[in-house]
Image: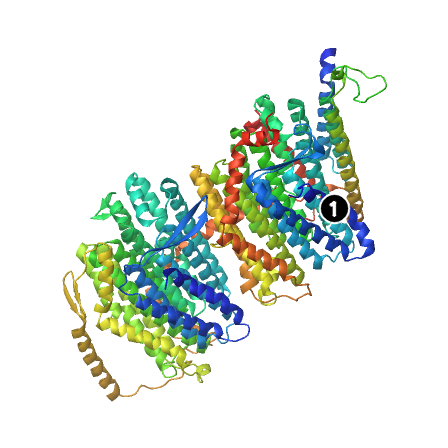
Amino acid sequence: MVNLILIIALPLLAAFLIPLFNYINKKLPSIVVFLTTAINLLIIILNYNQIILEPVIIELGNWQAPFAINIYVGTLELISITVISIISLIIAFYNLNHSNFSSESKFHTLYSIIIAGIYGIVMTGDIFNLFVFIEITTVAAYGLTTFNKDKGYEAAIKYIIIGSISSVFLLMAIGFTYSAVGSLNMAVIAAASNLINPGLVRIISLLFFVGIAFEAGILPLSIWVPDVHSIAPSAVSSTLSGLVFLAGITALIKIFFNLFADPSLYVFLMIIGAISLIIGELIAYQQDDIKRMLAYSSIAQMSLVLTIISVGTKYAISGGLFQLFNHAILKTLLFLTAGLMIKYAGSRNISDFGGIAKKIPLIAVGFSVGSLGILGVPFFNGFVSKIMIVNGSLNAGEYILTFLVLFATVIEMAYYLKVIQTIFFGKISINPHKIVKSYVPIIVLITVVFLLGIYPELITKPLNQATGELLSRSDYISNVLGGM
Amino acid sequence: MIDFLEKWSFFGGSVLLILIGLYGVITRKNLIKIFIGLSLMDTGINVLLVSLGYVEGGIAPIITSTINNNSYNFVDPIPQALVLTSIVIGVAVLALGLGVIIKIYEKYNTLDISEIRGLRW
Amino acid sequence: MSLFYYTFIPIVIAFIAYFLNKKIKLSLAILNSVVFAYLFYQISRLYNQWNIPHETISYYMFDREIQLIFQLTPLSWLFIFMTTGAGLLIAIFTIKSQQEYVLRSSFHLNFAILIGSILGVVLAGDFLTLFIFWEIMTWSSFFLISSGEKKAAQKASYRYIILSTIGAYLMVTALFIIYNQIHTFGYNQVAAHLSGLPITESIILIIMLAIPFIIKAGVFPFHVWVNGAHSNAPKEFSPFLSGLMLKVGIYGVILLLYFVPLYNILKESVNYRGLPIFNYILAIFGCITVITGTILAIRQEDVKRLVAFSSISQMGYIIMALAISTPLGFTGGLLHLMNHMIFKTTIFLSIAAVIYRTKTTKMSEMGGLIFKMPVTFTAYLIAIIALAGIPPTNGFISKWVIYQALIDKGYIFLSVAAFFGSIGSFMYVFKPLSTIFLGQLKPEHENIKEVPFLMQLPMFVLMALILLFGILPGLQMNLINQISQLLNIQPVGFTLYSITGAFGKWNSLVIFSLFVGGFLLAFIIFISAKKSKQVGLMDTYTSGEYMDDPEAYHYAYQYFRPFDRVFDSFAARSLTVIYDTFAQNIVKLGNLFRKSIVTGNGQTYAFYMVLFIVILAFAGWII
């Protein structure tokens, strides 16, 4: 058993050492990031069997639970960090060949910080620590956004304004919670949440929602997403869309299932998610800029996950979570391949990608595998999650929700197929630019997509366990607080 | 009345500060003024956090030579620790934001946020 | 060989071959032909082995293992036999025909996946398996249609996939509503559950289950995708699309109505003129499909569009026959299904051969190919004789049985529609015949040769089948009666060359000898008669006017104008417009959101945030 705190600490350490490494060799930073992500994956694999049996709680500074900041890794967190580590490793591998920025070491520093922040958001068991990690992630993301010298600053400034306002709300929520409970530990808050004035709980939960949902891809709070995702380098877009959203949703789930499990709030989440889903899909259909389209699609997918999870039944939650992890894998694939296609065609517009598949077939195939996965074609991973979502929402008797979800998928199909048809069957109309073709990440991601599509039990079995843990708050509380 | 003020002035004042900041953010067009608004909001939330941990008649939670045995007289130290963190983060974001504003001014020659709309739709 | 492998062999081989294709040109087409031939051989050996045990594959979903069931019945045997047979013929055809086609490798990959998935759909023993392969089938056919060479192929395939997906989602919704009650997808269990529900509820669920099949079959309110898809698909795929893909929709209808027997549930509902209302509406839709398809086919200038509309109208016949659910109707429907597959594949293949040589689909740009491409011409001629329903071809027999069934039940309107469609089909099939093959040769087609032998071979086989089944319908009837027995339908009496209808017997041997005699007589007259005089093609009388557009004066252009004029107002009222308007309104709504919400102003975004909190707070979150 290796201490899990390492997986947060290592990237942070790497981040601050990278400027030093950069003096030694310009190539070293990317290798360091690659190594740290690889070590993280190794640590998680070593711990996997133990955590799947029972949740691991790490108390920092050897203080007992309510007093110390703790790190809680249950099954949900385990799956999340596994997915995060795999994807961050793939992206780090991609960066080995593709970080042709003038300020390379800065990029890798920020990338390491963002990875550390994401791990932190997922694993922390302390609400103030959650705030800190969210801020770490967003500040690093602000920095990464500005790497595009063209419109990056504009995107960054919008991101910063919205991010700062939400951080104020989040901090306000934390302050109120602390004043009501007297502790920042999630388990303590969860145990005491029945004792707090219910009116206050509702205020706090609203503030929490606003503070976190801006990082989780829910309209209108995440209206910055298309700007940032379309501007940032594709490695960053895929991290932001795949991993940061995953972390954001995981944090929201923790707040609304572990902290304040008030079923009367779920209906709000469901309505917000459904509206955001439809609007996101409708706007995505309008886009001609491929990365903007993918960004709106991410918004829609996250809203879908939120709305399904807020149904609150076992089947619905596990379906939503599966969709969340699928989305992380697929969006990474989509953003990486879209980024390569953009570089190859020298344009961001879908209409300029005509017949690109004949020139760079594997990249085009990667993109279409990603899209077909999101659309839920059988034997792609999206199929099982979509079936599970339909089953979950119907099982709970949410017929209107089912209709909306499927309607949204039809719109989604419309715009993804537009791209696929253009890249495969369109007239060849590109003047190719030279690109570094890195096939390994694409092939690995495609393999993962099919692996999860054909053997969904790899993830659905742990997911069912995670859902069970989410729905039994008392276990969570007693796990953390022990006999208290 | 005095009693009421004493009890609620920190709380009310800090919330007022946040609202003023928010008002500034959503009405001023100038980016610098927007960031002043954001900074006001930050200050407001910091004051709010400290005021939440305030104990009536308490003293600073610092161990001095004249140790007071009545430990309940200390104000709660945790919010103060939180505020320190939050101030640091706030400053970092503010610095980054101002840096970005400088770049924006170089690029767009304006600080009017409604004119910086290259990314839309 | 396990049933499961029938679906997976083509798919797996296709992927392997796809990567080989870079090295060896045409390897895919040959490999596909070999694989399909092997499957065809294996499947033909399966005949009469109806008691092969079910096979299951477990697939972990939700929180349990779900069994995907594969089973073989006479009904599914018929379809897998037809699928691999048609696939084999088309694969042989493509070896030569696709030499200049750029998207060749993707065509073959998708084609093999399509064949595998259709086998999966048909062999499926429960609804989930059916749905999974149904989806794969939809997607692979989508890619096949998209890979058409025309620009419109993309729009057509788009319409196809959206419509299919809406259908599939209706089906999946219904399935999971049922699944949540009984926790199984088995055909029998679903049927048993549906019969226990209140009648309206079960009818709604049945309709939801049936719509994807009806969409795929191209029946009236959902026929809008058919003509675009058929006419724009690659010329080698159109035969399969029309010959088999539409039939898979019919398979679904048979599955629901007879195999699952949901007909028994429907019988409990409101009956109208001796038919459950659902069936009656289906029959009416079939009848509308016949009329619409016929009228629109006659108007077309593009030969593939014309045949596509003809497919629509022929599907109407089959649906009509199946919906009236008498033994005779069922037999007629199945017969017509097989026969339509044979002759429509022939028509599309012969047209593909013509396109291969002339590179155009406009009828007014062709003419006089009869002596240049005699085999193609003969194939087309025999196939249209079958399509028009003239003895001694197979098309006549199936239409004859359908008429008998309709008249027997006394559905005058349906019978009139069927006759109308039959007469209309004379008109529209004659148009390509006279304009492509007869008439005068275009100067630019002077050097055209007959297509290579590998392309002629499938046409020969199909021609032989048309005549064989025209003379010996008993071969088909044997299998159909086995299916009828399986589905508890009264078998129709038959011998090798005769079928017993409602009003008597049809003896095809006698008719065949009569026709052979008549044909010989006509041939002798033709030989002994004076030869016709050759006139230049553009030698048109124009009253001294300057001819700026000779095409418009070509006799093939607006061939049946007087007839068309009668139906002009009918043709203008297109369903497509309704669907398109609906889609456009959704797009407009999206545009409105985009323009009004995502303004690009960071301050507005901040304002949204505040507004969002205020609205949520006052909408009940806090207050």
Mark 1 highlights which residue?
A: A143
The colour scheme applied to this rendered structure is rainbow
Apparent side of residue C469 relative to residue A346 in the rendered image (left or right): left
Relative to C597, residue C344 above or below = below
**Could you tell me the amino acid type at mark 1?**
Gly
- Residue B89 or B71: which is nearer the viewer? B71
Q: Quadrant of the N terminus of chain C?
A: bottom left
Q: Give the chain letter at badge 1.
A: A
Residue C393: x and y in percent read 25, 72
Relative to C542, residue A220 above or below = above
Apparent side of residue C472 relative to residue A153 in the rendered image (left or right): left
Relative to A279, residue A334 above or below = below
Measuring 39% from the left and 55% from the top, which residue is drawn there? C573
In the structure shown, which secondary structural element does the residue marked by tag 1 occupy?
Answer: helix
Quarter-of-image position of residue A257: top right
Residue B30: x and y in percent read 76, 38
- Residue A241 or C333: which is nearer the viewer? A241
